[in-house]
Image (cartoon, rainbow, N blue to C red):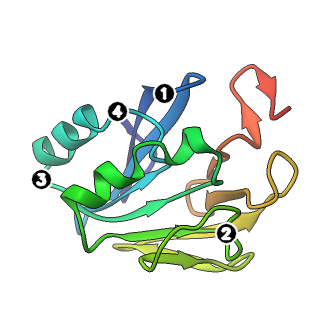
Amino acid sequence: MQPISDTMQVKSFLGGFDKNFSYLIWCTDTREAAIIDAAVEISPILETIESYNLKLRKIIITHTHHDHIQYLQDFVYYYPLIKIIGHPQPLKQMGEIYQGVEHHENISLGKTMLTAIHTPGHYSDSICIWDMKTEAIFTGDTMFVGRTGR
């Protein structure tokens, strides 16, 4: 776990098709949590949610390439009322529980406010998620660790 502020925590999970990351982020005050990209096997994420007594409320998808939504239905199975959030015009059919966010629209997570930033280039429905308070940004495949987003 990496505390990035006194009000927000983040834990990264590496795996999936192309050494992707999924992030579990949460508000330390309310314990409300979100996953950014459902790209890795869910068991370790579920264990972390349970061990920190978190309330998973949202899954934010940075883009709809298969590897970033690979485990999405697994999470929906365990959390059927969860909100799925991403670009307002996803390139894949995302179902009725999907909610599009506009450029610069805020996404609340407990007392934490995140901002969606549309970042087409890697994929036309790409977004980044920015926390202005901590200056943390979750880029999906807009940027890769050690290389560009192709």
Which residue was labeled with disc 2?
87
Upstream in sequence: badge 1 or badge 2: 1
Amino acid at dot 4: Glu
Which residue was labeled with disc 4?
41
Amino acid at dot 2: His
Number of residues whose C-alpha sits closer than 10 Å to that of mark 2, classed few (under 14), some (14–19) or many (20 or more): many
Q: Position of residue 78 (x, y in %)?
A: 19, 56
Q: Quadrant of residue 41?
A: top left
Which residue was labeled with disc 3?
53
Q: Residue 7, can we see it? A: yes
Q: Nearer the viewer, residue 78 or 55?
A: 78
Q: Is residue 36 left or right of residue 143?
A: left
Residue 33's place in the image compared with 81, above or below, is above
Q: Secondary structure at mark 1?
A: loop
Residue 72's place in the image compared with 66, above or below, is below
Q: Is residue 48 left or right of residue 134?
A: left
Q: Quadrant of residue 149?
A: top right
Residue at 67% of width from left, 76% of height from top? 88
